[in-house]
């Protein structure tokens, strides 16, 4: 069984009145989730809080954390996210203060000897392995879609006016179209980073990579990453969870 150590930090930042990010780090280290809420008043806060409350509840009912086939695990994850999505949609229909609320979600789930990583929206999961940083999730943003279509290039994408406009997130019908979860066999020395786009609004991949190896304490690294994003001019809430595989 792989051994894990974690660090986690979430701050409101310099530009927002309240923190609409939520995250959960399971005490038994079976799952880690980051959600970035959106919507007027406190609606985003409600949506992200619902995601990190309901997805774990469903996972604990549906998933055998000791293992199972990839399709069984992915199905349990997708059903859990689907359930949270429908509850968020239902609440936004009946509660005027929650109208049009939504949230992104990214996760790392352990089942047996494997990790399952995926998400909906533009929060991200990175893996640093053998000196290489890789983004394991896809952004469901209009800018990313334009990039994939070859309409714009990487440089243009950085400042594109649609870079924060999502075509998939929880709180919409498309939020139930799966989480694209991939199966990864963890290796000793792996460092995973789950973050809201408040991190990537302030720092780029090079700096994330640099900071992920800057200490042997995951909590110190989690704090450094958030501080760097803040200093880098992030205009959002900033949340990150660091997971070390020993």
Image: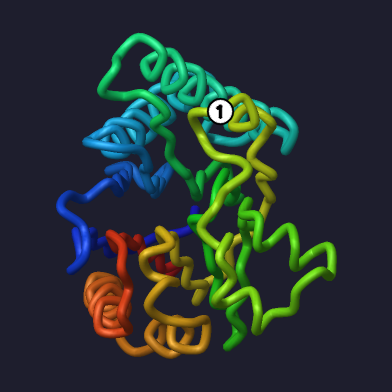
Which element carries disc 1, helix, strand or loop? loop
Q: What residue sits right under mark 1 in the picture?
A: 172
Q: Quadrant of residue 219?
A: bottom left
Q: Nearer the viewer, residue 74 or 138?
A: 138
Residue 65 shows in this picture: yes
Query: Which residue ends up furthest to the top in the rendered image?
Result: 94
Q: Please tell me whether residue 101 is drawn above or below residue 23 in the rendered image.
A: above
Q: Position of residue 242 (x, y in %)?
A: 37, 66
Q: Residue at x 42, y 28 (%)?
A: 100
Horizontal arrangement in the rendering, residue 13 relative to residue 146 (left or right): left
Give the class, few, some or many, for how many residues have Cα within 10 Å of label 1's Cα (few <14, many ≥20): some
Horizontal arrangement in the rendering, residue 116 relative to residue 200 (left or right): right
Q: Position of residue 205 (x, y in %)?
A: 52, 81
Q: Quadrant of residue 127?
A: bottom right
Quarter placement of the C terminus: bottom left
Q: Please tell me whether residue 231 is drawn above or below residue 94 in the rendered image.
A: below
Q: Nearer the viewer, residue 159 or 117?
A: 159
Q: Residue at x 27, y 61 (%)?
A: 8
Q: Position of residue 218 (x, y in %)?
A: 30, 72
Q: Nearer the viewer, residue 245 or 87?
A: 87
Horizontal arrangement in the rendering, residue 207 relative to residue 135 (left or right): left
Q: Position of residue 233 (x, y in %)?
A: 30, 80
Count of numbered circles on the image: 1
Q: Residue at x 21, y 50 (%)?
A: 19
Q: Residue at x 41, y 87 (%)?
A: 213
> How are the residues colored?
rainbow
Horizontal arrangement in the rendering, residue 24 relative to residue 89 (left or right): left
Q: Please tell me whether residue 19 is drawn above or below residue 177 in the rendered image.
A: below
Residue 113 shows in this picture: no
Q: Quadrant of residue 112?
A: top right
Query: Which residue ends up furthest to the right in the rendered image?
Result: 150
């Amino acid at each position: 069984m792989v051994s894990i150590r974690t660090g986690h930090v979430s701050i409101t930042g310099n530009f927002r009145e309240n923190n609409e990010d939520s995250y959960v780090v399971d005490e038994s280290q079976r799952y880690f989730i980051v959600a970035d809420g959106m919507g007027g008043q406190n609606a985003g806060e409600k949506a992200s809080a619902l995601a990190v409350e309901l997805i774990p509840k469903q996972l604990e009912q549906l998933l055998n954390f000791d293992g199972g086939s990839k399709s069984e695990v992915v199905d349990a994850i997708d059903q859990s996210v689907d359930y949270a999505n429908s509850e968020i949609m239902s609440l936004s229909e009946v509660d005027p203060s929650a109208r049009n609320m939504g949230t992104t979600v990214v996760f790392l789930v352990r089942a047996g000897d494997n990790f399952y990583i995926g998400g909906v929206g533009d929060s991200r999961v990175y893996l640093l392995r053998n000196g290489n940083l890789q983004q394991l999730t896809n952004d469901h943003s209009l800018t990313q879609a334009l990039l994939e279509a070859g309409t714009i290039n990487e440089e243009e994408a950085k400042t594109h006016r649609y870079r924060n406009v999502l075509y998939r997130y929880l709180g919409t019908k498309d939020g139930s179209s799966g989480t694209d979860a991939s199966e990864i066999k963890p290796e000793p020395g792996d460092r995973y980073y789950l973050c809201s786009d408040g991190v990537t609004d302030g720092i780029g991949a090079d700096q994330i990579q640099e900071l992920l190896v800057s200490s042997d304490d995951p909590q110190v690294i989690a704090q450094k990453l958030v501080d760097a994003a803040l200093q880098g001019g992030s205009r959002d809430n900033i949340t990150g969870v660091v997971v070390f595989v020993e």
